[in-house]
Amino acid sequence: MQTTAKYQPKSTGWFTSSRTNNGNQCVEVRFDGDAVLIRDSKYRRNPEHRLDDEPIITVTASEWMTFLDAVLGRHIHRTALIAETGADGHTTLTHERITLLYTPGEWDAFVAGVRDGEFDRVPLPA
């Protein structure tokens, strides 16, 4: 039996795909218990932005893993976290009322990391 209360890895810091070139503009993820937090590092690079207002998407580990399966084409059902790539190659990531926008390079690096398993949340056996 598996529990959704404990997931690994137990990383609590923000991290990006190892495929990200310079780490300045990328999809950033943080695991916090059963929650997965997602942000856009570009937001923090603009001095006009207030960090207290930074948009951060929060989903459960289960929702996250379902989303990763969708990114990899393992299932086609709509998930709570929605990624849509426009004609210009930019990808919007939306959950409820929060939307993040990623460049084609940022999204490609993220997807490569997903393929490599870098963002997996694996439930621990009970």
Image: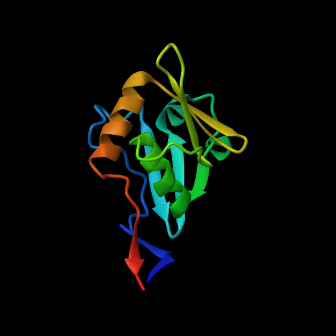
Instruction: Describe the colour scheme in one phrase.
Output: rainbow
> In which quadrant of the rendered view does residue 54 lie?
top right
Q: Left of 29 or right of it: where is 99?
A: right
Pick the front one: 78 or 60: 78
Identify the residue shown where x is 63% and y is 28%: 48
- The residue at the far top in this view is 88
- The residue at the far right in this view is 97
Q: Left of 28 or right of it: where is 99?
A: right
Q: Is residue 31 above or below residue 69?
A: below
Q: Position of residue 70 (x, y in %)?
A: 47, 44
**Numbered circles on residues, count:** 0
> In which quadrant of the rendered view does residue 115 lie?
top left
Identify the residue shown where x is 40% and y is 30%: 106
Quadrant, the N terminus? bottom left
Q: Is residue 5 above or below residue 27?
A: below
- The residue at the far bottom in this view is 126
Identify the residue shown where x is 43% and y is 52%: 14
> In which quadrant of the rendered view does residue 2 lie?
bottom left
Quadrant, the C terminus? bottom left
Q: Is residue 67 above or below residue 8?
A: above
Q: Position of residue 86 (x, y in %)?
A: 54, 19
Q: Position of residue 9 (x, y in %)?
A: 35, 67
Q: Position of residue 39 (x, y in %)?
A: 53, 43
Pick the front one: 39 or 108: 108
